Amino acid sequence: MTAPAVSIKNVTKTFGKQRAVDDVSFDIPVGSVFGLLGPNGAGKTTLFSCMANFLKPASGSIEVLGINVNRIGDLCGKLTILPQDALFQANVPVREQLEFFARLNGMTQEAAAAETTRVLTMVGLMEAQKKNARALSHGMTKRLGIAQAFMGTPEVIVLDEPTAGLDPVNAAAVRELIKDIKQKARATLIISSHNLAEIQELCAAVAILNNGKLVECRSVAELTQATGFVRMTFGRKLKDTEVATIKGQPGVGTVDGDTQNEYAIELKLAAGQTTDQLVGALVSELAKAGLVPRSVKEGASLEEKFLEATRQN
């Protein structure tokens, strides 16, 4: 059996009487894209800080690639972290800063220059290499942080809110960049985000924290599998009367919409009826009412399961 990339065992971190992380244990498989989720104050950043040895847990242990993070020096070049609000030095050109980081990882000056060119090209920032890092836009700064996180050949990469604060166009560009880099690098990626659709798109598995406790740790497929739900996407936001038409169909319970014109429809199967049969009949009846969905997917969204998990704890 392959050892996990990261193994978190009974980790507790306290700040006074507050338990920011409360006896948390889970493993992150090698080579996976893994999501860490939770509301504000759930303990995600604290856990990341313990993983990087910025903070010491009150109890428990964390191993990365089989190395206890207390020996963080042994993980130099193997573990990289992009903090949510990573800042770069003012009045120092982008290239100079990245070359400096590469030298800290043990590269020669020549190798550091070549690696800086590689990562700047990778994130589309070669034209900004001589600019003051603090003069970059927010989106460019995020890409610069990703360039730093992927320097060298790290085996575990932690990205804390890599698209936070970005407009939809830049956020989509960063997601595509992460997917593209993941295909080329054989690293384990750990991503924290409040954008649950983003996590569902990028990650194979997730852990959900709430009030410092682990409340879920499963594959996204397992977590969102639900024979009692179907998701239909329409070309526009439906009118209240049209939503009522859906609710009035046989076998339909609740109908919840989101900002992407996608509607989660609770199904109530009759005895002996399959989900496919009910969905087929529902689509047929909606078509008669002029409501033809662009897509139909079985299963709940990650957002719904996240809300369900965090409400219960």
Image: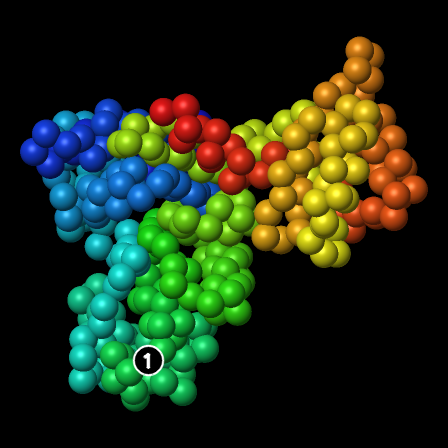
- Name which quarter of the figure residue 8 lies in: top left
Q: Which class describes the residues within 10 Å of circle 1: few (<14), some (14-19), or many (20+)? A: some
Label 1's element?
A: loop
Q: Is residue 194 above or below residue 207?
A: below
Residue 74 visible, this orientation:
yes
- Name which quarter of the figure residue 19 lies in: top left
Q: Position of residue 141 (x, y in %)?
A: 34, 72
User: Which residue is outermost to the left?
Assistant: 16
Residue sitting nearer the eye, 302 or 221: 302
Q: Which residue is mark 1?
A: 136
Q: Is residue 189 above or below residue 129?
A: above
Q: Position of residue 31 (x, y in %)?
A: 45, 45
Residue at image coords 23%, 76%: 97
- Name the quadrant of the C terminus: top left
Q: Is residue 313 above or below residue 130?
A: above
Q: Position of residue 273 (x, y in %)?
A: 82, 17
Q: Is residue 165 above or below residue 76?
A: below
Q: Is residue 49 left or right of residue 162?
A: left
Q: Position of residue 189 (x, y in %)?
A: 41, 49
Residue at image coords 89%, 37%: 284
Q: Is residue 277 left or right of residue 306?
A: right
- Name which quarter of the figure residue 225 lies in: top right
